[in-house]
């Protein structure tokens, strides 16, 4: 009798369990590593939040560029052999989070920051995880390319004469001596060289990788619009309940 009751209870619950099930589909596979729709949605939300764009734009956001970014990030993370060695410390994470909040209107106030997170369907842990991942990848890129992205004196002199001075003359500003700006020029040229080396390497990684995209741009747009509608409706309900 008890066994029959348990079976009846399970049978009655099945429709509710089926409705509660959340299907998280695969949108891409990179060297057997899956990228899920939920990862794309979260990346979109974080991008909008950190760029100061309204949450209502989630339905208009383009998912395809985000998937391409996630593919690149996945390829880079697959090259990292010791992730723990590249992890930022608590102070660095807190500083980066503070800098991110400083460019979001009102986010310096804790209550408004928490309200913004809720509006975008995020938690502070989500944003911190994003920051840690970005810092880890940036540190890896720096270690791999900084040493080989050397800039010689001739390149600095050329940049000074052909780019910096013409710009300064257009503005009518006083011309600085080369010695006073050579350090800044070297930094600019080094960053440019690192970006060039990284772009070349990413092309190589993509050429060697097995990358499968499992959804079309139309399907992605429909998914983003649906996700954005849920986020906005959820926020409206919260606001209505608070009134």
Image (cartoon, helix red, strand yellow):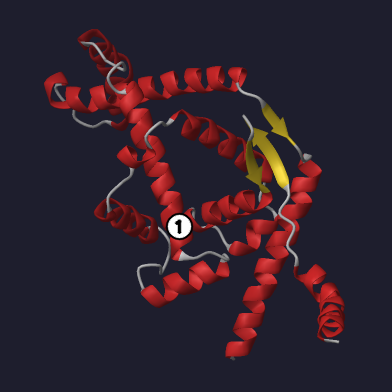
Q: Is residue 204 left or right of residue 220?
A: left
Indicate the secondary structure of the residue bearing disc 1: helix
The quarter of the image holding the N terminus is bottom right
Give how far across and how far down residue 45 sits, in percent: 57, 57
Give how far across and how far down residue 75 sits, in percent: 53, 30
Q: Is residue 53 left or right of residue 187?
A: right
Residue for point 52% across, 55% down: 46
Residue 175: tell me if it is visible. no
Q: Is residue 129 above or below residue 169?
A: below
Q: Name the residue that disc number 1 marks.
A: 127
Give how far across and how far down residue 129 sits, in percent: 44, 53
Residue for point 48% across, 19% down: 201
Q: Quadrant of residue 11?
A: bottom right
Q: Is residue 197 left or right of residue 218?
A: left
Residue for point 25% across, 18% down: 160
Tally the numbered discs.
1
Residue 28: tell me if it is visible. yes
Q: Tell which residue pokes out farthest to the bottom in this image.
A: 243
Q: Tell which residue pokes out farthest to the top in this image.
A: 154
Q: Is residue 68 above or below residue 109?
A: above
Give how far across and how far down residue 186 sits, in percent: 24, 22
Residue for point 60% across, 83% down: 239
Report crowding for label 1: few under 14, some 14 to 19, many 20 or more residues within 10 A (C-alpha).
Answer: many
The quarter of the image holding the C terminus is bottom right
Q: Is residue 60 above or below residue 208?
A: below
Identify which residue, 101 or 75, lies in the foreground. 75
């Amino acid at each position: 009798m008890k066994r029959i009751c348990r079976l009846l209870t399970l049978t009655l619950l099945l429709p509710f369990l089926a409705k509660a099930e959340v299907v998280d589909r695969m949108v891409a596979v990179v060297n057997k590593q899956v990228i899920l729709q939920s990862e794309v949605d979260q990346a979109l939300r974080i991008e909008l939040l950190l760029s100061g764009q309204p949450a209502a734009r989630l339905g208009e956001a383009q998912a395809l560029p985000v998937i391409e970014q996630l593919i690149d990030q996945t390829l880079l993370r697959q090259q990292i052999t010791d992730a723990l060695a590249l992890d930022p410390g608590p102070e660095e994470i807190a500083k980066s989070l503070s800098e991110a909040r400083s460019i979001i209107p009102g986010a310096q106030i804790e209550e408004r920051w928490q309200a913004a997170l809720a509006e975008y369907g995020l938690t502070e842990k989500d944003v911190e995880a994003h920051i840690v991942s970005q810092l880890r990848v940036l540190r890896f890129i720096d270690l791999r390319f900084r040493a080989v992205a050397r800039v010689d004196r001739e390149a600095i002199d050329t940049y000074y004469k052909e780019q910096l001075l013409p710009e300064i003359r257009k503005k009518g500003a006083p011309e600085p001596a080369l010695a006073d700006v050579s350090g800044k020029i070297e930094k600019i040229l080094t960053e440019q060289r690192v970006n060039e080396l990284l772009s070349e390497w990413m092309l190589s990684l993509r050429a060697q990788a097995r990358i499968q995209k499992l959804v079309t741009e139309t399907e992605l747009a429909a998914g983003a619009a649906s996700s954005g509608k849920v986020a906005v409706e959820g926020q409206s309900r919260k606001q209505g309940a608070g009134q």
